[in-house]
């Protein structure tokens, strides 16, 4: 029997958006949920064309492109809500309320519904309705100020904010779904990118409040300040990542580098000694290639690994041994995580073209061929082709 996943039978409606909401929908689909993504019809500007071509985070979902700002479009969404367990959306606060598709509208249709909202700033406060992107939310969370070299913060791509926030939304949805299925009571799950970023820093704040963290980049043990937790260049322009925090790993690192006798391992945590340690490490790593050092530290337990490119990472034996990538529609993509012993996630299906499932979705909602044709002609629903 083909794998169906732990969320088999769960129905989800994803109301457009970019970044965290599509990632959340993809994760639920990866776990076996039936996800219908309602696309907002895209324009013909360069960004819209790029999004249409890339069709990001759409694997495993069915797609319908439509305008739900009118009565006919709103009725279609309401029919989807009526037969679904979860709705997720990422519009600015108040947008869907004005369209009659806000949480209270949808909970009136389906009292056991879980309504997930993903905002940037949160739904309240002076910035709630102000546009922004991942870097802005990280800036106000305090996280961006802690990342990068001492003279300038560096944005950690959009992974920490957008997708960290998305995983908090996923966790909240599954908690609320459990409650809905045991109590028959739906609710609103309100997640934000800024809120998720702040929550991810719980340990960091604890270290800071204990007086063990300096509010200055590259001056702490895990921000590149410590010589035993940073990257070093090799002779061929590659890099090795060092994470030798514990004393036994630090000793292994020093031994693997051939620096026993030149570095005093008892002074590993002595900040005044860090520049001297870093000087030895920097000079030594530059004497060999990345491949040579990789071979050394495959035999020595010093928490030292090569820094791989995206293409190299997909080919690495460790990733292959654990099935961390999967071939989906001819492309090698990250596989669903985590693994389940009794309800393994199915291999994701490739993304269909945006709006490509409209005919099947309308049929499932009870719309006849004639009614579907009227919706196409009226511009309410984009024709599947």
Image (spheres, rainbow, N blue to C red):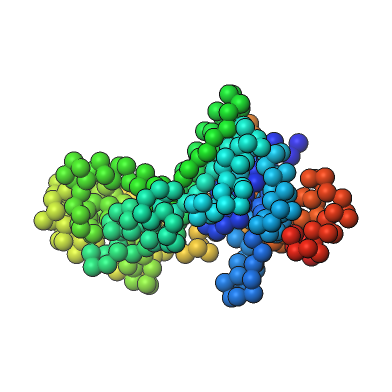
Where is residue 122 drawn, in percent x and y?
42, 49
Q: Residue at x 56, y 49 (%)?
A: 97
Q: Which residue is drawn at 74% across and 53% down?
A: 72
User: Which part of the image, by quadrant, shows the N terminus?
Assistant: top right
* Image position of 332 with respect to 335: above or below: below
Q: Which of 50 and 292 is in front in this view?
A: 50
Q: Nearer the viewer, residue 153 or 256?
A: 153
Q: Nearer the viewer, residue 373 or 195?
A: 373
Left-right relation of 279 to 307 = left
User: Which part of the image, by quadrant, shows the C terminus?
Assistant: bottom right
Where is residue 221 drawn, in percent x and y?
23, 51
* Image position of 161 with respect to 283: above or below: above
Name which quarter of the figure residue 379 lies in: bottom right
Name which quarter of the figure residue 85 lies in: top right
Where is residue 293 drawn, in percent x and y?
36, 61
Res. 356 in view: no
Q: Residue at x 61, y 47 (%)?
A: 101
Q: Which of 30 and 371 is in front in this view?
A: 371
């Amino acid at each position: 029997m083909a794998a169906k996943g732990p969320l088999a039978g769960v129905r989800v409606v994803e109301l457009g958006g970019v970044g965290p909401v599509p990632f959340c929908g993809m994760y639920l689909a990866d776990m076996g949920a039936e996800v219908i993504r309602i696309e907002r019809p895209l324009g013909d500007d360069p960004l819209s064309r790029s999004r249409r071509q890339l069709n990001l985070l759409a694997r495993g979902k069915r797609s319908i492109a439509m305008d739900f700002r009118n009565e006919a479009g709103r009725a279609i969404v309401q029919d989807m809500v009526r037969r679904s367990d979860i709705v997720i959306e990422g519009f600015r606060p108040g947008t869907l309320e004005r369209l009659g598709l806000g949480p209270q509208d949808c909970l009136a249709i389906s009292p056991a519904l879980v309504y997930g909202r993903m905002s940037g700033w949160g739904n309240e406060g002076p910035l709630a309705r102000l546009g922004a992107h991942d870097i802005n939310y990280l800036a106000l969370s305090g996280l961006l100020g802690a990342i990068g070299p001492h003279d300038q913060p560096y944005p950690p791509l959009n992974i920490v904010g957008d997708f960290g926030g998305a995983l908090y939304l996923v966790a909240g949805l599954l908690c609320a779904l459990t409650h809905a299925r045991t109590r028959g009571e739906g609710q609103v799950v309100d997640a934000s990118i800024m809120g998720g970023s702040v929550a991810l820093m719980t340990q960091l704040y604890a270290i800071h409040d204990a007086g063990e963290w300096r509010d200055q980049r590259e001056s702490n043990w895990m921000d590149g300040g410590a010589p035993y937790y940073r990257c070093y260049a090799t002779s061929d322009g590659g890099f090795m990542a060092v994470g030798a925090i514990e004393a036994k790993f630090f000793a292994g690192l020093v031994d693997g580098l051939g620096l026993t006798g030149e570095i005093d391992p008892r002074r590993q945590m002595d900040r005044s000694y860090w520049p001297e340690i870093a000087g030895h490490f920097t000079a030594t790593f530059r004497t060999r290639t990345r491949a040579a050092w990789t071979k050394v530290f495959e035999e020595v337990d010093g928490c030292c690994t090569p820094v791989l490119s995206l293409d190299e990472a997909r080919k690495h034996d460790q990733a292959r041994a654990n099935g961390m990538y999967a071939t989906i529609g001819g492309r090698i993509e990250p596989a669903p995580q985590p693994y389940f012993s009794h309800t393994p996630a199915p291999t994701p299906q490739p993304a269909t073209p945006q709006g490509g499932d409209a005919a099947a979705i309308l049929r499932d909602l009870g719309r006849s061929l004639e009614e579907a044709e009227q919706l196409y002609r009226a511009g309410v629903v984009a024709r599947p082709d």
